[in-house]
Amino acid sequence: MTDFLKRISGRNSPQAGITLTSINLKFGADVHAIAGREIKEQVFRLEIPFQNKIGSGLLPDNLKGPEITINDVLIERPFELVDASPKTPLNVAYMSRTVFKLQIKGPPSYTGPLSITFSTDSKDNVNIDVEKVTLIDGDRRADVEDTAVNMILKKSQIVRRDVQVYKILKYGRTVEKVGINKPFEIVSSDPPFPFTVDRKDSYIIKLYIKCPDFNYAGPMEISFK
């Protein structure tokens, strides 16, 4: 296993206490978990061989055709990809092999898995990973249940989000405008603003949200004013 995945310590990296319980390699619908390890540096390196051969034993394997194009290497939060070599997009011919050298920044302290995705999605697409949606009205905050979602969208795509506001807006409350945290942008709403919560069906607001043109992982915060 040490031949399969080798960690090289980051030079001049701040010390950290990171325990990787497993390293999950994702390709298409397949996930291959390998053993975790102790990480002492906040910035560290991983070398991951990628072999385009069915049944090679070195996963991820290519199961979808003679040649594949790796368009992106994605690292899930709370980790951040600092650098990757070779650069993507990268064509990997059948029966050939490449080694991805990744430089990754982690949190000062962490115990849990590290997930790495080899994406064949077009560079015109972005990965939007919303960990939770929080509604804000003045000093009041309310998290919306079951709002974590991972979407692959076109760059700057506009999506519709139906928001239940009963947890944050009182009956009779008039909202003049609505805001959202960057890098998102609210394009329009139904009903349009200003609006008043004055009947049962007005507790659902349809928001049309413009997503960023780059990968994003974090919260979505919607504020009413």
Image (tube, grey):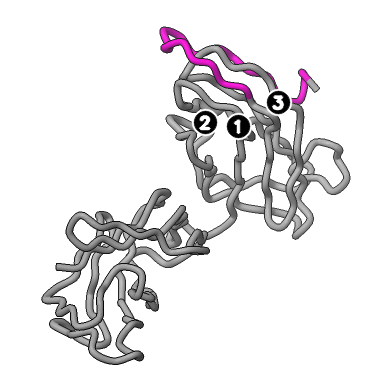
Is residue 23 placed above or below 203 in the rendered structure? above
Sequence order check: which comes first, mark 2 or mark 3? 3
| Of the pair 91 and 17, the residue shown nearer to us | 17
Type of the residue with mark 3: Gly
* Label placed on residue 36: 3
* Alpha carbon separation for disc pair 1 and 3: 18 Å
* Alpha carbon separation for disc pair 1 and 2: 6 Å
Is residue 20 placed above or below 55 in the rendered structure? above
Question: Marks 2 and 1: in contact by CB < 8 Å?
Answer: yes
Seen at 42% across and 67% down, the residue is: 154
Seen at 88% across and 45% down, the residue is: 55
Q: Is residue 73 left or right of residue 94?
A: left
Secondary structure at badge 1 equals: strand
| Extreme residue toward the top, this view | 12
Q: Residues within 10 Å of mark 2 (few under 14, many from 20)?
A: few
Secondary structure at badge 2 equals: strand
Type of the residue with mark 1: Phe
| Of the pair 129 and 166, the residue shown nearer to us | 166
Q: Find disc 1 in the rendering and name its residue.
A: 100
The quadrant of the picture occupied by the N terminus is top right
Seen at 68% across and 41% down, the residue is: 25
Query: Which region shows up in magenta?
Result: 2-19
Q: Find disc 2 in the rendering and name its residue.
A: 85
Question: Residue 174's spot in the image, x, y percent?
Answer: 15, 79
